[in-house]
């Protein structure tokens, strides 16, 4: 893939129903989706996972973690997913292709839709961050900090603005990232992972805020495939989605943009990483069922 991004392809032994591109969230890596990818593989889907630019062992080793480029960094992230979809289409040209994204991967996915919704046959999103109207103020603060520290600098102020408030609603948290999951084994694994939880650069956060502004404006979407099926899954206790109101607002934006086939599900007692909760099996099954429903209905994007 572009920039020689680390990736893994999972190919079923039998007939291939379709293909799935897995786009991970911020401050993590594609290796955390191995179990999920193998589950979809056993369900008959070829799955491609990859490390986003500025993420994973390679970025940590070469000093580019949380940095996506001097300019147009958010476009770099979107383009990495476009290339992933093209790779799947090239290897499996006769089957549907689906986009799966988690957290920041859903933000990239929604921005992917703006210009590329005719490239895919369906989309599944988990841990869906809602648009935050305070992003403009945060971006102005970030611009001032960037003037002083530079694009590749780091800022504890921006760290707190971006994710610092998510743990506030957790009673007696054992770590700063308990908001990720009720599953303490998962939380501890995240904390212990050298390629998880590392702060973005100042420019990385500015790019993230650029993405939020783009995805939050329904007028930005150049809808070519209004019947594209879109599934949104999230935990009810996920602070990232903005509560039920924030989740509803996310759905509303997509509907205002023109998408007509939107399905949603909120899981009680689950937090942000629903694929890693102790009862994640039900989420796996629901996602596979969503893929199978799109496959069986033969709903296809514009080719």
Image (cartoon, helix red, strand yellow):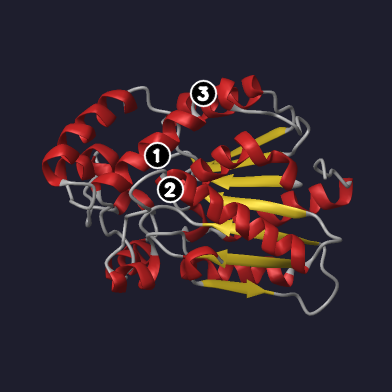
Q: In this view, does 10 lie to the left or right of 292?
A: left
Q: Which of 151 and 158 is in front in this view?
A: 151
Of the image marks 2 and 3, the number of the one nearer the N terminus: 3
Kindly state the secondary structure of the residue where label 2 is placed: loop
The answer for how far apart the CA atoms under marks 1 and 2 are is 7 Å
Q: In which quarter of the image is the C terminus?
A: top right
Tag 2–tag 3 contact (CB < 8 Å): no
The answer for how far apart the CA atoms under marks 2 and 3 are is 24 Å
- Give the percent coordinates (x, y) of residue 208: 38, 41
How many marks are shown on the rendered structure? 3
The answer for how far apart the CA atoms under marks 1 and 3 are is 18 Å
Tag 1–tag 2 contact (CB < 8 Å): yes
Of the image marks 1 and 3, the number of the one nearer the N terminus: 3
Residue beneath label 3, please? 217
Q: Which of 237 and 150 is in front in this view?
A: 150
Q: Which residue lies furthest to the bottom in this view?
A: 13
Residue beneath label 2, please? 272
Work out whether 44 lies above or below 253: below
Question: Is residue 128 visible from the viewing direction of this image?
Answer: yes
């Amino acid at each position: 893939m572009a920039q020689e991004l680390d990736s893994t392809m999972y190919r079923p032994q039998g007939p291939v129903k379709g293909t799935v591109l897995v786009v991970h969230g911020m401050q993590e890596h594609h290796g955390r989706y191995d179990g999920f990818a193998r589950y979809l593989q056993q369900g008959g889907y070829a799955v491609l996972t990859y490390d986003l630019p500025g993420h994973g062992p390679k970025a940590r080793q070469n000093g580019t973690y949380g940095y996506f480029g001097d300019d147009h960094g958010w476009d770099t992230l979107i383009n990495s997913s476009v290339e992933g979809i093209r790779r799947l289409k090239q290897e499996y040209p006769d089957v549907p292709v689906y986009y799966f994204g988690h957290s920041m991967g859903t933000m990239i996915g929604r921005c992917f839709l703006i210009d590329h919704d005719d490239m895919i046959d369906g989309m599944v999103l988990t841990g869906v961050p809602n648009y935050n109207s305070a992003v403009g103020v945060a971006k102005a603060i970030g611009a001032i900090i960037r003037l002083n520290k530079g694009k590749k600098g780091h800022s504890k102020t921006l760290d707190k603005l971006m994710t610092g408030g998510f743990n506030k609603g957790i009673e007696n948290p054992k770590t700063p990232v308990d908001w990720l999951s009720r599953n303490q084994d998962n939380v501890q694994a995240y904390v212990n992972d050298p390629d998880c939880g590392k702060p973005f650069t100042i420019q990385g956060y500015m790019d993230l805020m650029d993405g939020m502004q783009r995805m939050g404006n329904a007028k930005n979407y150049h809808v070519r495939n209004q019947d594209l099926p879109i599934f949104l899954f999230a935990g009810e206790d996920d602070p990232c989605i903005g509560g039920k109101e924030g989740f509803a607002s996310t759905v509303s934006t997509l509907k205002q943009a023109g998408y007509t086939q939107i399905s949603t599900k909120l899981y009680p007692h689950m937090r942000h990483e629903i694929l890693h909760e102790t009862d994640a099996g039900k989420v796996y099954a629901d996602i596979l069922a969503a893929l199978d429903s799109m496959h069986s209905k033969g709903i296809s994007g514009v080719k």
